[in-house]
Image: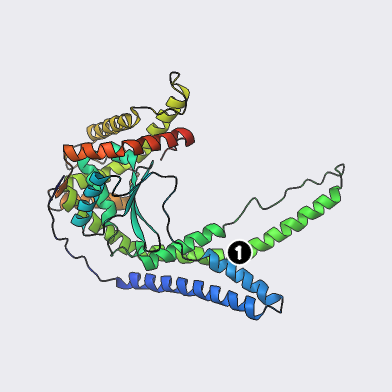
Amino acid sequence: MEHVRHDRPAGSAHVGMPGAAAYAVAGLVHLVTGALFTGSLLLIVVGFHTVTQPLIGFVLLVLALAMRPRVGRLDPDLPTLRPSDAPALFRLLDEVADASGVRHVDAVQFSTAFSVTVTRYGIRRRRCLVLGLPLWVACPPQQRVAAVAQALARTAPHDIRSGAFVGMALESLTAGLRTLRANGDAYIEWTNDPTAWRAGDVAGGARRFNARARSSEWLLWIPRTAMTATARLLLRLTLPATRNSQLEADDATARTASSEAAIAALNDQRLARAIGVEMHRLVIETKTLSRKRPATASQPDFWEAIACHAALLRETRDSDRPTGAEAPAPASDAGRDPFDALRVTRLADHPRHPATVSLDEAGLSRIADELRTTGQALLAKMMRDGAVPA
């Protein structure tokens, strides 16, 4: 692995009016959560001799607990590697992080998704890179560097949506909405059959149960609506900063992995669906059509088959792409996000950058050896649970 350190140009530190409003809304969310928790305890303790105040306090306490800030955790179902488990992989990740001007990651988890993201866990909000093994095996070496650089560069301080203050407010609202989600199954359907045993009692009980369920749904509708509106407002206010951070991450990726690799990595995001379908097909084929091995046995060439399928998809896409300045966009680009297309065009129009971090054959071989056990563990998980198309 070759690495040349460069100085990352400082981005604009100006938050702007939408960013300032997002901080204000996030602060209001934290204040409301604290006020709900404090007020509920006061109502329960001070008004303990009454009946109404503790009841109201209990309801407020439930809302406060639903909106409490969550401490992220590592997914226990995903294979996890630490620096001591994969020194070559973490050496590459540290070089990419240094080139992008961001903090190093503390752990790497591997998933079956065609994506690379950074999550935070623990009170100290340590960083974990969630690396999709299908993306890793499907991309050429330099595009792997670009995909990792894109994910790491997104953790720069300019993306206030992923920051501690605004990010935790969004996480609290999302978790609260999951806790208070509407339950459409909390109703009893009863056909009043006069020949049934104690039909009148059962029908009356069903009516009383449904009445209580409707009352609770109406009570929860107000906080659910408020949480939904606040979460959407935060997403809308942080959208400019998020898009600016994506553009800055694209620039950092181009400087780190080269402009060509950054553009190719963005274009290969459209392969996610096809790769997911192929993974699903291979898993079903192994579990149902293979007669020489048990249904849960690992398929030795599974990840090699995914890499070959991705290369074929890439070759077919490139051969079908029209040439010339006046050529129309291919049909595969019709449903593409306009902002993603803008990102690709922006990188193509800017001056080209060479790679400052490259993955050579020796480093690639060492990383492949370190990930062999992880690939087998993920494959065993898919054979057990099935692979869901992306």
In this picture, residue 209 sits left or right of residue 263:
right
Q: Residue furthest top?
A: 292
Query: How is the model colour-coded?
Result: rainbow
> In the image, is residue 38 above or below residue 202?
below
In this picture, residue 63 sits left or right of residue 238:
right
Number of marks in the image?
1
> In the image, is residue 103 above or below residue 79?
below
Q: x, y (%) of residue 26?
A: 42, 70
Q: Nearer the viewer, residue 373 or 68?
A: 373
Looking at the figure, which quarter contains the N terminus? top left
Q: x, y (%) of residue 6?
A: 13, 57
Tell me the residue at 46%/29% (across/down): 296
Question: Which secondary structure, mark 1?
Answer: helix
Rate crowding at label 1 as few (under 14), some (14 to 19) or many (20 or more) other CA atoms within 10 Å.
Answer: some
Query: What amino acid is labelled 1 in the image?
Result: Leu
Report if residue 271 is visible in the image.
no
> In the image, is residue 124 above or below residue 306?
below
In this picture, residue 14 sits left or right of residue 162:
left
Looking at the figure, which quarter contains the C terminus? top left
Q: Residue furthest front?
A: 84
Residue picked out by circle 1: 220
Report if residue 125 is visible in the image.
yes
Q: Nearer the viewer, residue 332 or 120?
A: 120
Question: Could you say which quadrant of the image residue 327 lies in?
Answer: top left
Q: Residue furthest bottom?
A: 46
Q: x, y (%) of residue 301?
A: 33, 27
Question: Could you say which quadrant of the image residue 245 lies in?
Answer: bottom left
In this picture, residue 212 sits left or right of residue 182:
right
Tell me the residue at 59%/75% (across/down): 41
Q: x, y (%) of residue 357?
A: 16, 48
